[in-house]
Image: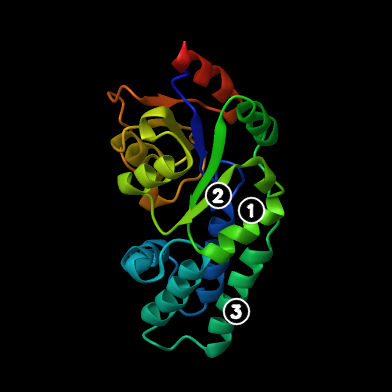
Amino acid sequence: MRGLTTIGFDADDTLWHSERVFRLTEERFAALLADYVDSEGLSQRLLETERRNLDFYGFGRKGFVLSMIETAIDVTDGKVPTSVLKDLIDLGRDMAAHPIEILPNVRETLHEVAERYRILLITKGDLLDQEQKLARSGLGELFQAVEIVSDKSPATYQRIFARHGDGPERSVMVGNSLKSDVVPAIEAGGWGIFIPHPLTWALEHVEAPMHAPRFRQIERIGELPALLASIES
């Protein structure tokens, strides 16, 4: 019996671009407020609002739009015009309509890994938003199961890998977030493979678990099949 049987993949910024859509939207947010407030410190105010709202709205586009609206009201002392608030709502719709851009070598790698392992998609965020992105990506049929969760914790990975695999000890989680994809998967007893993305949300930054025996890092998803083979050798 082989050691590894189940490979979990993150979605946003692991399989397709996501954060750069948020960054572009944030730039448009700053432009909309340019006539009402100094742009210096605006990004930090928005980030603080997002952090505060995570427990209420969770992760994803809807929470981001609500945080933009709240920040616009706060930084203008409630003087922001309703026309600007309407524009912010429209930015959220633009985000939802943005094309899904698959990262290089993703489809080929998923096909190759699926020949030897059970592969899962494990992503967090708004259910409807993530379902729509997956459907538009054309990758959904490649996964044996899809789990869309509100957050990623060791308990999340223990539950998912027990339900769809042979437990975390024989499972791997692959993703671009150390905080959400790698560290909690290792803490659950599995392997965590980190694939850095040039853009990572500030609230997803933590130190890499360099001394953890089950931590690995690669630069591109195309390196994954060889790494999995080396783990099992």
Please say whether residue 43 is visible from this viewpoint: yes
**According to the image, label 2 marks what residue?**
146
Position of 27 relative to 113 (above/below)? below
Of pointers 1 and 3, the one earlier in the residue sequence: 3
SS type, badge 1: helix
> Disc 1 marks which amino acid?
Leu
Q: Is residue 12 visible?
A: no
x, y percent for residue 229: 52, 16
Nearer-the-camera pick, 194 or 130 = 130
Q: Residue at x 59, y 42 (%)?
A: 144
Q: Nearer the viewer, mark 2 or mark 1?
A: 2
The residue positioned 47% from the left and 18% from the top of the image is 2
For label 2, the crowd category at 10 Å Cα-Cα, with few meaning under 14, some 14 to 19 and many 20 or more, is some
Q: Which mark is residue 60?
A: none
Tell me the tag on residue 134: 1
Q: Which mark is residue 87?
A: 3
Density class for disc 1 (Cα within 10 Å; few <14, some 14-19, many ≥20) is: many
State how far apart marks 2 and 1 are (Cα): 10 Å
- Amino acid under label 2? Val
Q: In the picture, residue 25 is in which quadrant?
A: bottom right
Q: Could you tell me how far apart the alpha carbons at marks 1 and 3 are, in whole angstroms?
A: 27 Å
Label 3 secondary element:
helix
The x, y position of residue 122, in whole percent, is: 49, 47
Number of the front mark, 2 or 3? 2
Q: Disc 2 and disc 3: Cα gap in Å?
A: 34 Å
Do the numbered discs 2 and 3 sit on residues whose CB atoms are within 8 Å? no
Q: Nearer the viewer, residue 37 or 209?
A: 209
Give the residue at the far top of this rendering. 233
**Tag 2 secondary structure:** strand
Q: Residue at x 46, y 77 (%)?
A: 69
